[in-house]
Image (cartoon, grey):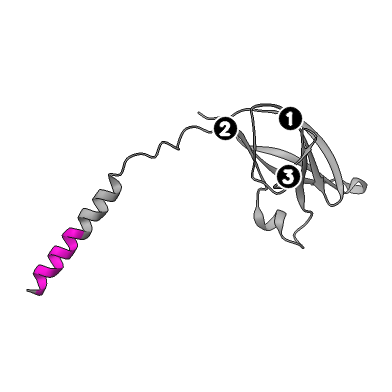
Amino acid sequence: MRANIYRIACAALAAILVAGCASPHSGNRSPRTTALIMSGDVVSYGSPGFGPRVSISEVDGKPVAEPYGPLELAPGRHTIKLACDGSTNPHTLTVAAGEVYQFLVRTAGAKGCVATLARVRTTNP
């Protein structure tokens, strides 16, 4: 008797799992239509004591709501002002849909902290 209950329970569980796998595709998985800037390694860029903090202060002359990203950009040419330990430096780059960039810190002697962006993923295949 008990074995029959377990068989029925296992069959019902298997049917539920199969039904979940057969759900229709959501449609939100289209290729990215924007470029993305992310902060990169959360530990080394976001925690005090792990080196300089990099943030985005402006994009195309306008302040940003999320200085540590993620930030989506329309394809095209943009001027991005990065802040790094009190110093800011502008970068002009042309981005394409699907590209992903992250912060990169370069410390150069007397100049102190210099921030830049590194492309970590190219456009959609």
Q: Say which element carries label 1.
A: strand
Name the residue carrying label 3: 104
Instruction: Examine the rendered structure and indicate whether residue 122 appears above or below residue 54.
Output: above
Residue at the far left in the pictured view: 1
Disc number for residue 48: none
Residue 114 placement, left or right of 28: right
What residue is drawn where x is 73% and y is 43%? 64
Give how far across and how far down residue 27 sits, in percent.
Answer: 41, 36
Q: Which amino acid is tagged 2?
A: Gly
Q: Which amino acid is tagged 3?
A: Leu
Instruction: Examine the rendered structure and indicate whether residue 52 appears above or below residue 76.
Output: below
Give how far across and how far down residue 63 sits, in percent.
Answer: 77, 41
Residue 77 placement, left or right of 30: right
Name the residue carrying label 1: 78
Nearer to us: label 2 or label 1: 1
Q: Place residue 46 in its image quadrant.
A: bottom right
Q: Do labels 1 and 3 touch, CB within 8 Å?
A: no
Q: Quadrant of the N terminus?
A: bottom left
Predominant secondary structure in magenta? helix
Give how far across and how far down residue 57 sits, in percent.
Answer: 78, 44
Q: Say which element carries label 2.
A: loop
Q: Which residues are magenta?
A: 2-12
Residue 93 placement, left or right of 29: right
Nearer to us: label 2 or label 3: 2
Q: Distance between the Cα atoms at labels 2 and 1?
A: 15 Å
What residue is drawn where x is 68% and y is 48%? 39
Q: Which amino acid is tagged 1?
A: His
Q: Distance between the Cα atoms at labels 2 and 3?
A: 19 Å
Q: Place residue 77 in its image quadrant.
A: top right
Disc number for residue 98: 2
Q: Place residue 92 in its image quadrant.
A: top right
Q: Earlier in the sequence, mark 2 or mark 1?
A: 1
